[in-house]
Image (spheres, coloured by chain):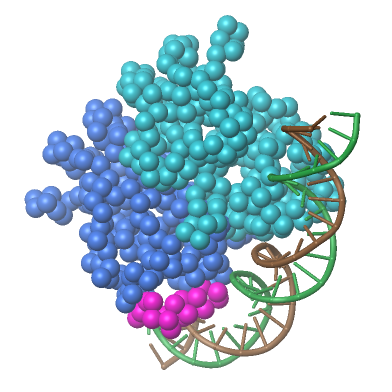
Chain colours: A cyan, B blue, C brown, D green
DNA sequence: CGGTATTTTGAGCAGTGTCAAAGACGGTGG
DNA sequence: CCACCGTCTTTGACACTGCTCAAAATACCG
């Protein structure tokens, strides 16, 4: 919380702590992982489909997203990642990536060799467990997104995405409750919700004109969190956070 | 392959073998797991949202599906499970289920207490790894479904679902290539693809009238697998099978 | 054989998509 | 500091896929 507050992997520990108990020894072991830090540019590929993965990338600052493309070129964004999240922990035991990950914004990343992670997981069962839980929660989020895209209308879909993002950022200690900066274009928002950018625009404006959200550039605030999360049909249980976050008013 | 061919957990081993190497000792250890066998009726709940999970259910015969419901009552089917698959291996380290699992048909299930599985995973790292890989592959399938529902039209969506099901059944050694029995109503097909049952019906008939599939009750055959899988935009890589299955003509 | 669940069909409608163009914004070079 | 340029956002008109409602035809099951 103090001396290592500036280490790049501190946020990774915090992320794991949102769902798992991490003791001091585990914490120290994670912070001691070898890594190389570098900067990634917006839309730079961090994981490429069909390629083998040999290292684990952790977001230190900035955002990234997973995506997959159909043969006719339309793109579906599968998840959005915030600082502290590991981008390919989940592929650790698979041969080839089955999708892509791209930087959403400029992002600082820490690159950790897989062998170091594997060794750590062997040595510290609690960490192995936390990694598995991480992956399981990500799968839970995929399920919720599937429900979102498959069964909710445009209005709810977008509201849901915004609610999730807000709560995750807040749980990770990155933003206060009440609003956040959304680093996505409306086209990307559409790719995440299965809509066209034009319709995203109309839906956002509709939500805005109903007083359910306020926008200033890409800063979003929620004047009526309770109503919005009801419209979104948002229940954070699927995020499996250890400590329920009191969000909104 | 011989003496234990009839044991209920044989199919579970086979399933793990579709993606991981399982040696004889591991195989024996899995087959030796304690279990209770029983029959589940169609639509019986095998996992219930918000409840803690205390045991692992393996499908021995019959099918099951995961689903999640919005507050206004529409349902999204998240995945379909075939014999040999474990239904809640993925929840093994989470407190509460975030979705439901129901039997699709009458199904024989083997119920294994979680402690036995945890112990086995501690003792046999290859099995722990295989379980993780199982979960990761399931997540990969969720991602593909998200792409399917978010970015493909009705025709491709349904074709994709059929292709996936056919290949998975075939890889698990349950059906020969060329066709299979689809134990789902058109309403369930709609819930899996984010469509209404009426539109599923129309799409199926269209595919049929174009000679891309043949139906006899719920038996489906593929007179033109190559064309169908092209329309479906189906590439089995996301299933992460160890041995590519030659499917179709 | 009767009753229920499923499939099929029709007609009309609504939510989203498409195409196109006009603003607004933000960064860059002169 | 301003003009310029590319990227985003916003708006309009219109088309179309997939939805709703409703009812008939089949299939399934005890």
Image: A166 above or below A130: below
**Above or below B36: residue A10:** above
What's the magenta region?
Answer: B198-216
Indicate left or right for A248 with A235 as reference: right
Most common secondary structure along the magenta stretch: helix
Please state the total of marks drawn on the protein image: 0
Lateral position of residue A196 relative to residue A100, left or right: right
Q: Which quarter of the picture shows residue A132?
A: top left
Is A237 in the magenta?
A: no
Q: Is residue B25 visible?
A: yes
User: Where's residue A107, x and y in %?
Assistant: 59, 28
Residue drawn at 55 percent across, 56 percent down? A74
Q: Is residue B200 magenta?
A: yes
Question: Which residue is nearer to you in this view: D28 or A83?
Answer: A83
A166 displayed left or right of B7? right
Seen from this angle, which residue lies furthest left? Answer: B3
Expressed as whole percent of the image width and height from the top left, the position of residue B1 reads: 11, 51
Residue drawn at x 66%, y 57% is A196
Give B7 or A142, whichever is nearer the viewer. Answer: A142
Please give the name of the residue rendered at 52% of the width and 78% of the height, measured from the top-left corner: B202
In the rendered image, residue B198, in percent from the top left (x then y), is placed at 55, 76
Residue B6 position by quadrant: bottom left
Tell me if B175 is positioned left or right of B160 in this view.
left
Along the line of sight, which residue is nearer the eye, D5 or A65?
A: D5
- Residue at the far top: name it: A3
Residue toward you, B2 or D29:
B2
Residue visible at 33% across and 23% down in the picture: A115
- Residue B204 x/y as whole percent: 46, 76
């Amino acid at each position: 919380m103090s001396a290592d507050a500036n280490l790049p992997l501190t946020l990774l520990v915090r992320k794991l702590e949102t769902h798992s108990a991490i003791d001091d020894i585990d914490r120290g072991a994670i912070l001691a992982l070898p890594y190389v830090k570098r900067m990634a540019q917006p839309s730079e590929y961090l994981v490429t489909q069909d390629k083998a993965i040999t290292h684990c990338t952790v977001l230190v600052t900035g955002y990234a997203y997973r995506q997959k493309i159909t043969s006719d070129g339309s793109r579906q964004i599968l998840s959005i990642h915030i600082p502290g999240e590991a981008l390919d922990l989940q592929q650790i035991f698979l041969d080839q990536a089955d999708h892509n990950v791209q930087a959403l914004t400029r992002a600082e990343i820490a690159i950790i060799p897989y062998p170091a992670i594997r060794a750590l997981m062997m040595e510290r069962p609690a960490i192995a467990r936390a990694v598995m839980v991480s992956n399981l929660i990500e799968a839970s989020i995929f399920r919720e997104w599937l429900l979102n895209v498959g069964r909710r209308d445009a209005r709810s879909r977008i509201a849901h995405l915004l609610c999730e993002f807000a709560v995750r950022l807040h749980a990770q200690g990155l933003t206060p409750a009440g609003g956040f900066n959304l680093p996505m274009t409306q086209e990307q928002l559409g790719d995440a919700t299965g809509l066209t950018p034009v319709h995203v625009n109309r839906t956002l404006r509709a939500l805005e004109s109903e007083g359910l959200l306020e926008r200033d550039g890409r800063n979003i605030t929620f004047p009526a969190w309770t109503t919005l999360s009801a419209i979104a049909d948002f229940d954070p249980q699927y995020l499996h956070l250890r400590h329920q976050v009191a969000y909104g008013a």
